[in-house]
Amino acid sequence: MPHSASAKKRHRQNLRNRERNRAVKSDLKSQVRKLLTAISSGDVAKAQEELRTVAKKADRAAASKTIHKNRAARIKSRLTARVKKAGQGGSTAAAAKGRKTAKA
C-alpha cells in the first residue's frame, strides 16, 4: 500500500484509469462480436454499419492510448477484409471463423 500522499493519489488515479480502460476495451470487444454476428448471419448492410462503429471505437481507444495504434489498425484491417469477403458472396462461415477455404 502507498504511504506518501503523492503515492496514494497516484494509486487512486491508477484505479480510476484502469476501470475506464477496461470499459473501453470491453465496449470495443462487444462491438466486434456484434460485427462478427452480422457477418455470420449474412447481413452485409448491417455488417458494414457495425464496421464503421468498430473502426470509430478502435480509433478512439488508440487515440487515448488504451490500446496501441497498430492493434487498432490490425482490428480494422482484418474486419474490413471479412466484411468485404462477405459482401462478395464468399463463404460467410469461413469468413466468420477467419479461415481460408481450401481450393480443390
Image (tube, rainbow, N blue to C red):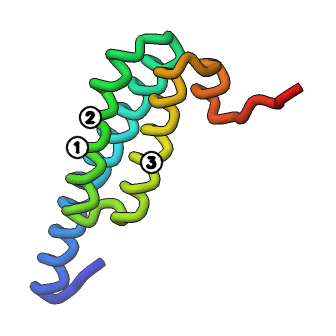
Query: Along the horizontal axis of the image, is 96 left or right of 71?
Result: right
Vertical order, 99 against 57 (above or below): above
**Residue 63: x %, y % from top left:** 21, 62
> Is disc 3 placed on a helix, strand or loop?
helix
**Residue 101: x %, y % from top left:** 75, 29
Label 3 vs 2, first from the N-terminus = 2
Amino acid under disc 2: Arg
Label 1 Cα neighbours within 10 Å, binned few <14 / some 14-19 / many ≥20: some
Image marks 3 and 2: residues in contact by CB distance under 8 Å: no
Q: Quadrant of the C terminus?
A: top right
Residue 48: image quadrant is top left
Residue 103: image quadrant is top right
Residue matched to label 1: 56
- Nearer to us in this view, 23 or 11: 23
Q: Quadrant of the N terminus?
A: bottom left
Residue matched to label 2: 52
Image marks 3 and 1: residues in contact by CB distance under 8 Å: no
Label 3 vs 1, first from the N-terminus = 1
Amino acid under disc 3: Ser
Image marks 1 and 2: residues in contact by CB distance under 8 Å: yes
Q: Residue at x 12, y 76 (%)?
A: 9
Disc 3 versus disc 1: distance between alpha carbons?
A: 13 Å
Q: Residue at x 39, y 56 (%)?
A: 73
Which label sits on residue 77?
Answer: 3
